[in-house]
Amino acid sequence: MLNKKIHNKTELRDQINLILNDRSLKNPLTESQIIISHSANKSNYLDVKFEDIDFQMIEYIVSQRITGKPLSKIIKQKGFWKDIFYTDENTLDPRSDSEILIESIIQDFNSLKNSKFEFIDLCCGTGCLGISLLKEFKSSTCDFIDISRQALSNCKKNIYDLAVDNRSNLYESDLFENYPISKIKNIKLIICNPPYIPTSLYYALNQETLHDPRISLDGGVKGLDFYIKIVNSIETMPFKGDIYFEIDPTIVDELEKFLLEKSIKIVYKKQDYLNLDRLLKITFP
Ligand SMILES: C[S@@+](CC[C@H](N)C(=O)[O-])C[C@H]1O[C@@H](n2cnc3c(N)ncnc32)[C@H](O)[C@@H]1O
């Protein structure tokens, strides 16, 4: 697939770029650089030396990529916030849309930057949200919860690889079912990106998104099942903190209606880089 007469890294990058661009794949130049870095076992394209590049690996990655499989699912990693996370067919790939949650929590909890506090990453998947916060708040502790054993295994791998294992606990649990509720009174905040795609829209998702597990996407008939279950169970617990929910424009009106009917205080709503509603902060004073 690649022209054998490639003399340097830039020529190689341009060739991969051309192949991906011909297939109308998004961000071909960035992906070309990621593919080259990955094949040379480097995290940054600028650090790659031509002699370290594994051409066989590049052939394999490009051949998979042009079938429409997401790059992250081929190389089993995705960058999020300041780190690279392991991901595979069992976990939703970290999305840059979710970084607004990290940014907001860093702002809101600035005064606790060096304090000890506990938080929960509910529906943690790869753990990208909780791990990124653990690395920003160096004295904090996180309880990671997911119903999927395979997702938790990926989360555990990331926790060890990114050296936050001494401040992490993992719970295989259907929301709070197997979580020790006695811990909840000490929890300062819950960060949660639950499945929120309305079932009827699931099959209309683009082909790349359908490589993520259905359990990470399908949020029930209106996409609200998880928000409703979480809020209803939190109401019965001695939780006095904030919940940072990732949201989506398709569900936000119905979700706000539900919260209003329950008289739950919405602290703020924020938009992502594309100006789409992406974060809802609620509080349980
Ligand atoms: C949208 S993904 C979010 C993953 C990760 N937090 C992120 O932002 O990339 C939702 C996650 O919820 C998990 N999940 C689905 N149903 C659940 C349940 N009943 N209890 C706990 N976790 C659940 C899925 O396994 C998946 O990892």
Image (spheres, rainbow, N blue to C red):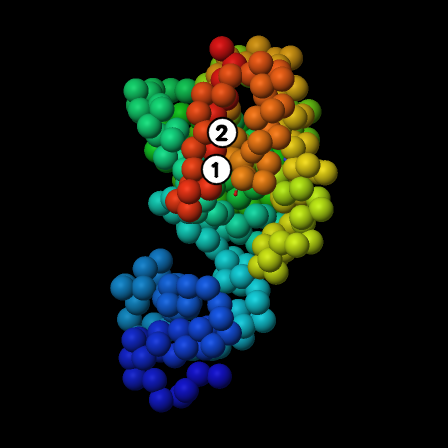
**Residue 243: mark:** none
Residue 173 % position (x, y) = 66, 31
In the image: residue 135, left or right of residue 175: left
Residue 254 % position (x, y) = 62, 30
Residue neighbourhood size for the residue with mark 1, other residues' Cα within 10 Å, grouped as few (<14), some (14–19), many (≥20): some
Q: Residue at x 49, y 68 (%)?
A: 25
Three-letter residue code for mark 2:
Leu
Please count the marks in the image: 2
Mark 1 vs mark 2, foreground winner is: 1
Specify whether tag 1 is near ligand 1 (CB below 8 Å): no
Residue 100 % position (x, y) = 41, 37
Disc 2: which residue: 280
Q: Residue at x 27, y 64 (%)?
A: 46
Instruction: Choose between 32 and 134: the one closer to the eye.
Output: 32
The relative height of residue 83 versus residue 281 in the rendered view (above or below) is below
Q: Is any atom of residue 200 visible in this view?
A: yes
Disc 1: which residue: 277
Q: Is any atom of residue 60 visible in this view?
A: no
Ligand 1 lies in quarter: top right
Three-letter residue code for mark 1:
Asp
Q: Residue at x 32, y 79 (%)?
A: 11
Q: Residue furthest bottom?
A: 5
Q: Are circles 1 and 2 on residues that touch, CB within 8 Å?
A: yes
The relative height of residue 44 versus residue 119 in the rendered view (above or below) is below
The relative height of residue 138 versus residue 89 in the rendered view (above or below) is above
Q: Residue at x 67, y 48 (%)?
A: 201
Residue 18 % position (x, y) = 41, 77
Q: Helix or strand or loop: what does disc 1 sit on?
A: strand
Instruction: Choose between 284 and 167: the one closer to the eye.
Output: 284
The relative height of residue 114 versus residue 68 in the rendered view (above or below) is above
In the image: residue 257, left or right of residue 106: right
Q: CA distance from mark 1 to mark 2?
A: 8 Å
